[in-house]
Image (cartoon, grey):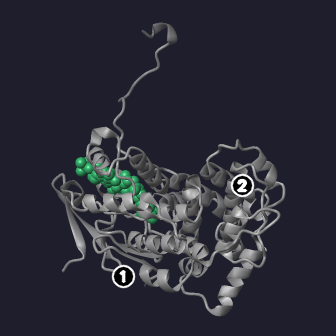
């Protein structure tokens, strides 16, 4: 079977090459289309456009499959942890014991922010959204590092240090932004604590006593980070690649990813889901009123945490999180009415022709907020937790572009639909 595509345009036939990925995904290569035909393609929302080839994450949206470097998310969720999975995503293989120690020691050595950063925190109003703080402070943190300010694209021997510094400091920044929002003094990281435990310590301890680190709480948050660690070319990861393609430094590219993730259609959905469930609970709605509104495009309401550009089946992460919800709430002896509402909404939606016809299923954000609420994470910090979890994926995509010998700046085209030739009209002649 020919692996070429034929295109008939203006009476001429053009032959376009195709490519097939390791999981048999197929693409028509249009890299030479404009040069050969004068045409470009247009694809609203890039739903049919591949920006790159990548070795990091594979998703089969119809089957509900997600694999990091070939390993199914279900196996990693059951057997791995966030730091080990971050190594896998960034460096391509599961770490040996020695590599894991090297990675973990790098985190510990790079977890402190420059003390002057506290002045930046003082500048934020107490109501500042932690995602605004996170994005700003990632760039601010880079200002204390000479090499980041004079970034040698592709030649930076210290790249692993920057990987560890970003992964480690994003946690410290997140904790500081939480403490700032509560008017509390910052708590410094502890050398003896591992990644996720240290974040909880920095958020919830006080200067006089350490936060009681319940193993089930640490494990639940670590699972949330692991499940969010990468997701191929989603909106924020594509943003990171867009900025990286200009050869900007790693911190600048990931700070841009934070901004893209913040939107309620993307990572901000986890906060929007809880706010939706709280509204339904407050109104005493059994969910049916809200579902009716969500089906009406004019209502301005969506069933947040439902639907996905790629998954036209149950998001495998949502399945894992839903199961973890029941386990964590049972262990913590919490009975959250919002979980019952969420389950009722899911049951009703999955039987409703509107959602069934559009293949709308729960996505990663539908249940994640229930767990974060149960372990004491405030709702305004939910998307920050998503950003911490996604950092390995953003870094891995940055690294992939940086190591690609032929990487070019991302610069899409457009079809202009504005004024044709126009001329300046002096002010006095304008009506
Ligand atoms: C994440 O891309 C990723 O990989 C993202 C992510 C990751 O890990 O990085 O998985 C994380 O961002 C998950 C998605 C979180 N967002 C939400 O939960 C917000 C609610 N969902 C929708 O906004 C929507 O489903 C999107 C944004 C997720 C997907 O949007 P698309 O692919 O552009 O689909 P669409 O808006 O064109 O919807 C198609 C139809 C429309 O109806 P019709 O025009 O056919 O009548 O489905 C409807 C939409 O109105 N629809 C919904 C709906 N989602 C889609 N109707 C009600 N409620 C919803 N949630």
178 over 333 or under it: above or below? above
Q: Quadrant of residue 175?
A: bottom right
Q: Nearer the viewer, residue 118 or 260?
A: 118
Does residue 375 appear left or right of residue 425 in this picture?
A: right
Q: Is mark 1 within 8 Å of ligand 1?
A: no
Total numbered circles? 2
Q: Tell us which disc is closer to us: 1 or 2.
A: 2
* Ligand 1 found in image quarter: bottom left
As drawn, 177 above or below 152: above
Residue 179's mark? Answer: 2
Say which residue appears at 64% left-offset and 71% top-offset: 154
Q: Which numbered tag is attached to residue 22?
A: 1
Q: Residue at x 46, y 15 (%)?
A: 425
- Which corner quadrant holds the N terminus? bottom left
What x and y, as percent, mark residue 59? 37, 73
Look at 36% across and 29% down and name the residue there: 419
Find numbered disc 2 in the image and state the secondary structure of the residue it sits on: helix
Residue 338 has which mark? Answer: none
Please name whichever residue, 48 or 322, is drawn nearer the observer in this view of the structure.
322
Pointer 2 residue Cβ closer than 8 Å to ligand 1 = no
| Sooner in the amino-acid sequence: mark 1 or mark 2 | 1
Outermost left residue: 11
Q: Is residue 270 above or below residue 302?
A: below
Q: Is residue 336 visible from the viewing direction of this image?
A: yes
Viewer-closest of 138 and 152: 138
Spatial CA distance of label 1 from label 2 is 46 Å
Circle 1 sits in a helix, a strand or a loop, which is it?
loop
For the C terminus, the image quarter is top left
Task: Give percent across and percent down for residue 402.
Answer: 58, 69
């Amino acid at each position: 079977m020919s692996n070429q595509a034929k295109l008939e345009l203006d009476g001429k036939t053009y032959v376009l090459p195709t490519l097939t990925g390791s999981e048999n995904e197929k693409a028509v290569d249009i890299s030479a289309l404009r040069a050969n035909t004068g045409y470009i393609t247009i694809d609203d929302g890039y739903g049919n456009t591949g920006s790159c080839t990548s070795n990091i994450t594979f998703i089969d949206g119809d089957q509900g499959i997600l694999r990091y470097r070939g390993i199914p998310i279900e196996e990693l969720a059951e057997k791995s942890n966030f730091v080990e999975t971050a190594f896998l995503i960034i460096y391509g293989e599961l770490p040996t014991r020695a590599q894991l120690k090297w990675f973990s020691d790098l985190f510990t050595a790079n977890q402190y922010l420059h003390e002057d950063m506290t002045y930046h925190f003082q500048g934020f109003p107490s109501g500042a959204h932690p995602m605004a703080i996170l994005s700003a402070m990632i760039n601010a943190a880079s200002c204390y590092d000479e090499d980041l300010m004079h970034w040698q694209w592709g030649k930076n021997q210290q790249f692993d240090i920057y990987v560890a510094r970003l992964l480690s400091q994003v946690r410290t920044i997140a904790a500081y932004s939480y403490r700032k929002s509560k008017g509390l003094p910052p708590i410094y990281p502890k050398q003896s604590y591992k990644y996720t435990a240290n974040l909880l310590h920095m958020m919830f301890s006080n200067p006089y006593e350490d936060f009681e680190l319940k193993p089930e709480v640490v494990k639940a948050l670590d699972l949330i980070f692991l499940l969010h660690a990468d997701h191929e070319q989603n909106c924020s990861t594509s943003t990171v690649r867009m900025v990286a393609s200009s050869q900007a430094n790693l911190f600048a590219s990931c700070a841009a990813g934070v901004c893209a993730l913040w939107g309620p259609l993307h990572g901000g959905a986890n906060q929007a889901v809880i706010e939706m469930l709280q509204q339904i609970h407050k109104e005493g709605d059994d969910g049916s009123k809200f579902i009716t509104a969500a089906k009406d495009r004019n209502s301005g309401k969506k069933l947040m945490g439902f639907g996905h550009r790629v998954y036209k089946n149950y998001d495998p992460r949502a399945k894992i999180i839903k199961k973890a919800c029941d386990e964590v709430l049972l262990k913590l002896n919490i009975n959250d009415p919002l979980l019952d509402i969420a389950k009722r909404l899911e049951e009703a939606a999955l039987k409703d022709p509107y959602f069934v016809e559009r293949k709308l299923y729960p996505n990663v954000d539908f249940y994640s907020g229930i767990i974060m609420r149960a372990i004491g994470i405030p709702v305004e910090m939910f998307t920050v937790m998503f950003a911490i979890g996604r950092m390995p994926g953003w870094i891995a995509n940055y690294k992939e572009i940086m190591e690609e010998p032929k990487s070019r700046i991302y610069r899409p085209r457009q079809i202009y639909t504005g004024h044709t030739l126009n001329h300046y009209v002096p002010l006095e002649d304008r009506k």
